[in-house]
Image (tube, rainbow, N blue to C red):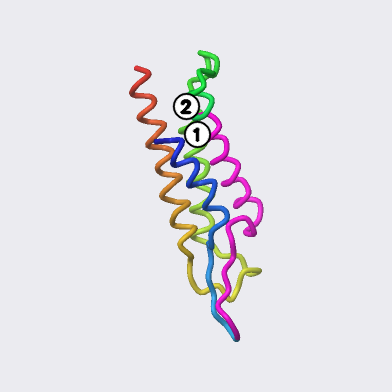
Amino acid sequence: MSGLAGLVLMLSSFMGWYTGSGEGPTTSVLGWHTGTLGKLVFFLGLLVLLLAILRELGITLPASVPESLVVIAAGSLATVFVLIRVISIGEEYLPADGRGIGIWAALVAAVGVILGGLLQASEEL
């Protein structure tokens, strides 16, 4: 579950996070173009996806660093970063009068990463 959520989180950085309509056509701002937080969301999703791929290949992290803890931490950070972008739209993205589907997909995927990490933790016990 965490691998799929990581993939969606990663891809959501290339979806429209903000939409706006002013004079002329409707515009959309991709998550990647929202600054450092959008790029960090992409790399956190990539980290989770790589951990899932490595686990399937039989490569694990050292026993002192539980993989589920890393996944939960990455999901928590991604959730905080996406929530920051949901709450505040920077002035450079105006006239953005709404949030696009990409930011909601990123939020759902970030929570999915956390849930995937919790499921992994329950399997480890």
Badge 1 amino acid: Ala
Residue that protrudes farthest toward the top in the picture: 63
Residue that protrudes farthest toward the front in the picture: 57
Which image quadrant: the C terminus? top left
The disc at residue 73 is 1
Is 93 located above or below residue 106 in the figure?
below
Residue shown at 64% from the left, 59% from the top: 33
Left or right of 30: which side holds 76?
A: left
Q: Secondary structure at mark 2?
A: helix
> Between 59 and 117, which is closer to the camera in this rendering?
59
Residue shown at 57% from the left, 69% from the top: 28
Left or right of 92: which side holds 122?
A: left
Is 89 located above or below residue 41 in the figure?
below
The disc at residue 65 is none
User: Which portion, as a residue range, is magenta?
Assistant: 24-51
Residue shown at 45% from the left, 62% from the top: 101
Q: Position of residue 4 (x, y in %)?
A: 44, 40
Residue that protrudes farthest toward the bottom in the picture: 23
Residue shown at 53% from the left, 62% from the top: 17
Which image quadrant: the N terminus? top left
Is 78 located above or below residue 103 in the figure?
above
Q: Is residue 31 magenta?
A: yes
The disc at residue 69 is 2
Q: Quadrant of residue 2?
A: top left
Tell me if label 2 and label 1 are in contact, CB under 8 Å: yes
Q: Main secondary structure of the magenta part?
A: helix
Q: Secondary structure at mark 1?
A: helix
Q: Position of residue 61 (x, y in %)?
A: 54, 19
CA gap, disc 2 and disc 1: 6 Å
Q: Position of residue 117 (x, y in %)?
A: 41, 31
